[in-house]
Amino acid sequence: MNVLAIETSCDETALAVVSNKGTIHASTIYSQFPEHAAYGGVVPEIAARTHLTKLPTLLEKTLGEAELSLKDIDAICATAGPGLIGGLLVGLNYAKALAFSLEKPFYSINHLAGHALSVRLHETVAFPYMLLLVSGGHTQLIVVHSSSRFTLLGESRDDAAGETFDKTAKLLGLPQPGGPNIEKWALSGNAHAYNFPHPFANESHCDFSFSGLKTAVRTCIANTSENEKANIAASFQRTVAEILYERSCQALATCSIQKIPVKSFVIAGGVAANNFIRNALIKLEKKFQISCIFPPISLCTDNAAMIAWACIEQIRDGSATPNMRAAATPRWPLNQLNREGTTK
Ligand code: KG4
Ligand code: ZN
């Protein structure tokens, strides 16, 4: 079975064809950085229009790379949420129209389920496992019990980790996306030059907070010279890595208290591309006797292969059923997987 997936929840227009055996026949992405660069952030209306403009050519490209035609596609799915409503509507309706015209089943998929399951497209990871999802929009610690059952242990109460990288980069005068640029500058800086706050350091819950860190960096920049950029970037990055490590320790300790037998710790989302953060998190292996799994970066960041794979896994476990009336659902927490909206 070949599944065609469409992902348009934010500023990446992505398509993929994946087989039920886990072969990625093709995975294509158009990143809308040029369209949003002048505005310093994603403009929802521009994102939706760009998805609409790019989808037809990307579909052709995807099928070309897969060396398949539409008649080889057995099912079609799209991200229905969470995400920006305009982009979700474009992707969902494009996918539904394709499914209707080809007389194929259509499935609506949760973007976070895509992130949560993408590692299993790369290697066999047994359930249950702990997932740290760190992207531009989410910072969450999730127990993945199965393809369709998830427990959210903690999340950011304000900014997401990736968003904090992006905002800090802006404060430092570095271009977007901020994460990779801060990582680059941090290479030549002293990570212990400054001490920034660790919110909730002594608390036993698994939530995050990053807005205080951003404010501390702003104050630091205002009180230091231009040539402190690398030191500030390195100290900021160290602090984020420490916060992610501390909260992950808390989540794994919670699993141990609640006797949830997680054997692996998986990281997903764009921030998972950061090598300094990967090196900080690998220490969890020894402390908790688990294996840390860092999937390839192409599967960590937004892509449609993870949406196709979540669809395949959820068809297999019976939690996904064809639904031409699925609605775009901008807020769709993972623990409400079976409650996606339905159009009238
Ligand atoms: O998962 P993603 O591609 O898109 C979503 O937000 O869903 O994540 C994008 C985020 C951006 O905030 C970007 O700055 C961050 O991931 N990012 C990084 C790195 N590469 C991307 N953050 C830190 N270090 C990196 N190397
Ligand atoms: Zn994402």
Image (cartoon, rainbow, N blue to C red):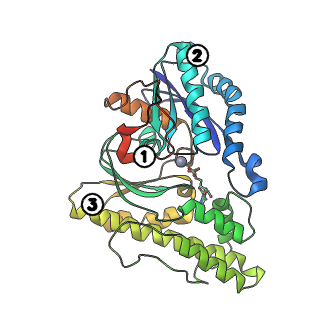
Q: Residue at x 74, y 50 (%)?
A: 36
Give me the C-alpha separation between circle 2 and circle 1. 28 Å
Which secondary structure lies at badge 3? helix
Left-right relation of 133 to 165: left
Residue 181 drawn at (x, y percent)? 69, 63
Q: Find disc 3 in the rendering and name its residue.
A: 255
Left-right relation of 147 to 220: left
Q: Residue at x 37, y 33 (%)?
A: 314
Which secondary structure lies at badge 1? helix
Give me the C-alpha separation between circle 3 and circle 2. 45 Å
Query: Of the residues under marks 1 and 3, which one precedes in the sequence?
Result: 1
Q: Find disc 2 in the rendering and name its residue.
A: 70
Residue 125 drawn at (x, y percent)? 35, 44
Disc 2 residue lies near ligand 2 with CB under 8 A: no
Find the residue positioned furthest to the front.
344
**In the displayed structure, would residue 342 be above or below residue 280?**
above
| Image quarter of residue 105 | top left
Please state which amino acid type lies under the numbered disc 2. Leu
Q: Find disc 1 in the rendering and name its residue.
A: 116
Visible residue check, residue 183: no
| Image quarter of residue 219 | bottom right
